[in-house]
Image (cartoon, grey):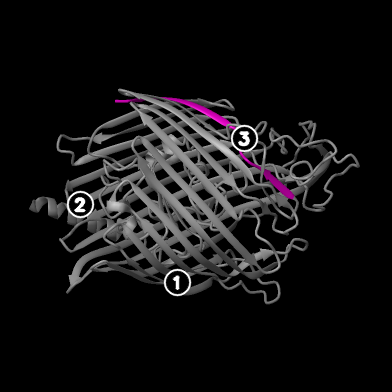
Amino acid sequence: MQNHAMRVAACAAALILSAPSAAQDEPTEVATTLAPVEVTGERDDEPPYLAEEASTATKTGTPILETPASVSVITAEALRDRGALTLQDALRYSAGIMSDAYGLDNRTDSAILRGTEFQSVVDGMRDQFNYYNTTRPDVYAFERIEILRGPASVLYGQGPSAGIVALVSKRPRAEAAHELIAEYGRFDRRRINVDSTGPIDGDGEWRYRTVGVLQRSDSQVDYAFYDREMLSPSLSWVPTDRFTWTLLTHYQRDDSRNAISFLPHSGTLLDNPNGRIPVSRFTSEPDFDRFEATRHAASSFIDWQIADTWSLHQSLRFAVNDNPYYTLYPDVFSNPQDPFLDDTRRTVARFVYAELRDQRDWTADHRAVARFATGAVAHQLLVGVDHAYSRFTRRSGSAYLDAPFDLFDPAYGTPVEMPELSDPFTTRARYTGVYAQNQMRIGNWIALGGLRHDRSGVEPQGGEEARENETTGRAGLMYETDFGLAPYLSYATSFQPNTDVDPDSGEVFDPLAGKQIEIGLKYQPDGGDTLLTLTWFDLTEENRVFYDLASFVPSVSDVDSRGVEFEGITRLGDLDLTASYTYIDIAKRRQYFAVQPRHLASLWATYDWRGLKIGAGTRYLGSTTDDGGTLRLPAVLLFDAMLAYDVERWRVAVNATNIEDQTYVTSCLARGDCFYGNRGNVVGSVGYRF
């Protein structure tokens, strides 16, 4: 035991000393689960869609019923049963989220939480520092997805006010388990998934896991394929039941052509004498268009229970992202009301755009947790410091191609010259935050308080570093009754540096500041098979940057987002049910918010009879407007279904989404473009476990 302790101490010290210092390329945001890799937050006997705990809201693996905040967990079983192919798919049945905000987009997962952007977090650390600069997360690589609604800067530093969508990677397990899945679906989707984990030695001190994906697929848009290669091997050292060290590497390469087409209002949402522009319309050139994203990442996670009271935790990650992006898109912006070149309203001009991106990110989080009591008050104290460093280099260029392009009967093959690219331009960003949080309990009362101070600096090439110092906080109070009812009240703030420049002063705008009041009610009778959450929130953003629709000149405005959310999960015998409803009212000076409907609702039901699973779901997307407040998009009702059969080691399944194959528009922007939603899709799979 003494040798084990010495080995643990030596490795932990080496890892801590190897973290980048502030003088080097620093690191960023934070977190991971408190418990070792075995813990997934789900009971063996709980419903497949219900998780008991979540780490994202507190970084301490607190039961959801005891957390004074709106928290959801999408379990691995839910991801599998609903046939989620992307993160957008995974979020479709969660309250407060418009998952397909801009329809099919191979570049990123365009979802909106409480009317604005959320922060993506992988294994407790910030994952994305710029738009379209990294691979889209593959849901097969993750054990679960957690959603924390509302400002989260106290634990995660600078970020938007809507909240956190956190993905938890699959990690090595003590028990051997292997899985091989073959999929085939509409649009010639072919895919192989592999997941293998278990002990390496007889004592289980060393454990491994390898997750891999190989995908070849077309899409609902002509010429727009979407291929993927992903490999994520990991290794855990568990010398005692008090220490776990996991090394996780990740390689992913996405190779595709652009599926997002920026189509005009006329012919999508509005009438056109030539009819509707097909959903399958590709507006670029097949020989020129290219969107690639390659990611190499290595992460380290240490969890060490050094005493009955104290535990130490460290998360590190280094990631390299490379992203060439070449495309053409129609000029619907110069004259949004009439972008056509001819009187028959068929042809448009196009822009040529090219960009080369390279980004390197260091992220790190060091934290300690103490569990103790002072008299009748039980405490769970969290203190930590996190760092982030990001270096982003880009070269870009554009050109105007006035050769007419027929949106209704296109002829491809127009010669396209690569536009002249700018010289490389590098931006460096550094963030450091110190934070503390205390979770207290006395009898049935639960209180949570947190405070954080951040220092950040953004340095454009050839310019001076723009520095910001910000302090954020959170507070929550909850009363847990003996019969499973838990009302709560919470308040939280956030900040995010703006990089846009005020044309009047010539200085960078003040940071985006968020604050939210939330009142909620949770109900889980007897800690059992039902969890219901009802929430009212009032979210305010100050200094959000908007661009004038005509001049494209930036200005700042305040945004108010108020609403009510309901989310419920229950099991009734062999029937599992999840339901959600969202009402959001968003107001902003001078313009309307696009994308976010006032009403969203969903219902998913799965019946399990002796290994035969039948599932069905429906999603309601309420009507909304463009950001000019003039175009009205109609509401839409979509249906999904699933049929699966588990027999011994085999699982055969068919998943269908938008089974009526409805053509609908998810959003339009006053600048001139509209976006189609995802067409109906069917994917069959055969899996073997051994």
Task: Examine the rendered structure and indicate whether residue 610 appears above or below residue 155.
Answer: above
- Residue bearing the label numbered 3: 679
The answer to if 82 sits in the magenta stretch is: no
Pair 2/1: label in front: 2
Query: Magenta stretch?
Result: 673-690
Disc ID at residue 383: none
Residue at horizontal 74 percent and vertical 53 percent from the top: 631
Q: Secondary structure at mark 1?
A: strand
- Residue bearing the label numbered 2: 243
Query: Residue 500 in the image: x percent, y percent?
Result: 63, 66
Q: Nearer the viewer, residue 258 or 249?
A: 258
* Alpha carbon distance from label 2 to label 1: 32 Å
Residue at horizontal 25 percent and vertical 63 percent from the top: 369
Query: Residue 11 in the image: x percent, y percent?
Result: 22, 53
Disc ID at residue 455: 1
Q: Amino acid at mark 2?
A: Phe
Pair 3/1: label in front: 3
* Between discs 2 and 1, the one toward the N terminus: 2
**538 displayed left or right of 206:** right
Residue sitting at the far bottom: 505
* CB under 8 Å between discs 2 and 1: no
Query: Residue 333 in the image: x percent, y percent?
Result: 77, 52
Task: Examine the rendered structure and indicate whether residue 436 appears above or below residue 74.
Answer: below
Q: Secondary structure at mark 2?
A: strand
* Alpha carbon distance from label 3 to label 2: 48 Å
Q: Amino acid at mark 1?
A: Arg
**603 displayed left or right of 275:** left
* Between discs 3 and 1, the one toward the N terminus: 1
* Between discs 3 and 2, the one toward the N terminus: 2
* CB under 8 Å between discs 3 and 2: no
Q: Nearer the viewer, residue 545 or 186?
A: 186
